[in-house]
Image (cartoon, grey):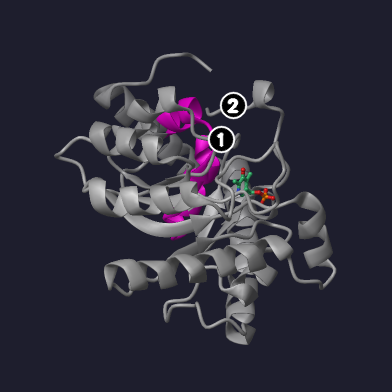
C-alpha cells in the first residue's frame, strides 16, 4: 500500500479502470458472480431469521446488512455495490481512506474498527462516512463532532459496549456512568452526530456456542443495557428514544437478529477468509 491517497482525477481514473475490469475481464466476472451468490445467501438467511425472530426490537424494514470488506480488494466492493449492496464496513482508517476516493460515492461506509483518537480527523473528513460503530468515550465523540466539517452530513454513531469484559476488546463497561456520559454527550453536545445505538463484538467462545443453538450472552447483555438506557433517558429527559443494536457477525448473525439486532456486520461468509494485514491489497 502506498501512503498517499489519490486525488480527484487520479481517483476517477482508478475507478474507471476497475469498472472496465468488472465489465470485461472473465476472471473478475466469475468472482463477482461468486460474491453475489454469497451475499444473496446471507440476505436470505437474514430474512428467515428476521421472520422467525422473537425480539420486539426489530424495525419494519428489518435488519441492515453491513458487508465487512476489510483487507479485501476494491474490485470486490465494486462488484457487490453493482449488485445493489450499499453498506460496507472497514476496520482500518488508512485502508478506508484509500478505498473511499476510488470507489463510487454512493457507497455508505461504516467504520467498525477500534478508534484511535489520532485517526478521528481523517475519518471525520470522509463525505460518505455513514456511521462509526466504535465510539468508546465521550471525549472521542466530542472530537469527532468538532472535526466533522459543517458542510458534510452528520455521522451516525454507536457506542461500543464491552459486554464480554475481555481486556482485548474495546468498549465501555455495560454498567457504570461512563456509558451514560457517552450517551448523553452525543445527544446533547454533538449536533454533527446522530446517536444511532449500541454495538458489541462479544467473545468468540459465546459466538461459537450461539452457532450451536445457544443464545449469545453478549447479545442479551447489549439488549438489557439498551433497555436500561432507554428507560433512563425517558425518566431523566422525558424522551422516548430507541437505540438500535449493531451485533452479529458471520458465525452468529442469526442469533443476533433473533435477539433484536438492527445492523449485522458480516465479512468472511461473503468475501471468504481474509489475508494477513501485511499481504492485503486494495488494487
Ligand atoms: C471483522 C469484523 C466483523 C466481520 O467478521 P466475520 O466473522 O468475518 O463476519 C464484524 N465486526 C467487526 C467489529 C469486525 O472487526
> Residue shown at 28%/73% (left/top)?
238
148 w.r.t. 178: above or below: above
Q: Residues within 10 Å of mark 1 (few under 14, many from 20)?
A: some
Secondary structure character of the magenta stretch overall: helix
Q: Which residues are magenta?
A: 74-99
Q: Residues within 10 Å of mark 2 (few under 14, many from 20)?
A: few
Location of mark 1 (residue): 73
Residue 50: mark: none
- Asked whether residue 16 is in view, the answer is no
Location of mark 2 (residue): 281
C-beta proximity under 8 Å, tags 2 and 1: yes
Q: Position of residue 144 (x, y in %)?
A: 32, 36
> Residue shown at 39%/35% (left/top)?
140
As helix, strand or loop, the secondary structure at mark 1 comes to: loop
Q: Nearer the viewer, residue 126 or 107?
A: 126
Q: Is residue 217 magenta?
A: no
Quadrant of the rendered image containing residue 196: bottom left
As helix, strand or loop, the secondary structure at mark 2 comes to: loop
Amino acid at each position: 500500500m502506498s501512503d498517499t491517497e489519490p486525488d480527484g482525477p487520479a481517483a476517477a481514473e482508478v475507478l474507471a479502470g476497475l469498472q472496465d475490469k468488472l465489465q470485461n475481464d472473465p476472471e473478475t466476472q466469475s468472482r463477482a458472480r461468486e460474491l453475489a451468490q454469497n451475499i444473496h445467501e446471507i440476505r436470505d438467511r437474514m430474512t428467515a431469521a428476521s421472520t422467525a425472530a422473537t425480539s420486539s426490537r426489530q424495525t419494519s424494514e428489518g435488519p441492515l446488512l453491513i458487508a465487512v470488506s476489510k483487507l479485501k480488494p476494491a474490485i470486490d466492493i465494486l462488484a457487490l455495490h453493482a449488485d445493489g449492496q450499499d453498506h460496507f464496513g472497514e476496520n482500518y482508517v488508512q485502508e478506508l481512506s484509500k478505498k473511499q476516493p476510488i470507489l463510487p460515492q454512493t457507497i455508505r461506509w461504516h467504520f467498525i474498527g477500534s478508534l484511535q483518537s489520532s485517526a478521528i480527523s481523517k475519518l471525520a473528513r470522509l463525505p460518505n462516512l455513514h456511521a462509526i460503530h466504535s465510539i468508546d468515550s465521550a471525549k472521542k465523540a466530542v472530537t469527532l463532532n468538532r472535526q466533522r466539517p459543517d458542510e458534510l452530513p452528520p455521522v451516525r454513531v454507536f457506542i461500543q459496549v464491552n459486554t464480554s469484559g475481555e481486556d482485548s476488546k474495546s468498549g465501555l463497561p455495560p454498567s457504570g456512568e461512563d456509558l451514560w456520559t457517552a450517551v448523553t454527550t452525543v445527544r446533547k453536545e454533538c449536533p454533527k452526530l446522530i446517536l444511532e445505538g449500541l454495538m458489541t463484538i462479544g467473545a468468540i467462545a459465546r459466538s461459537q456456542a450461539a452457532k450451536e443453538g445457544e443464545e449469545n450472552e453478549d447479545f442479551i447483555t447489549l439488549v438489557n443495557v439498551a433497555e436500561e438506557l432507554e428507560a433512563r433517558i425517558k425518566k431523566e429527559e422525558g424522551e422516548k428514544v430507541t437505540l438500535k443494536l449493531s451485533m452479529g457477525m458471520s458465525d452468529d448473525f442469526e442469533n443476533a437478529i433473533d435477539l433484536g439486532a438492527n445492523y449485522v456486520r458480516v465479512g468472511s461468509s461473503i468475501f471468504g477468509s481474509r489475508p494477513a494485514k501485511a499481504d492485503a491489497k486494495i488494487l
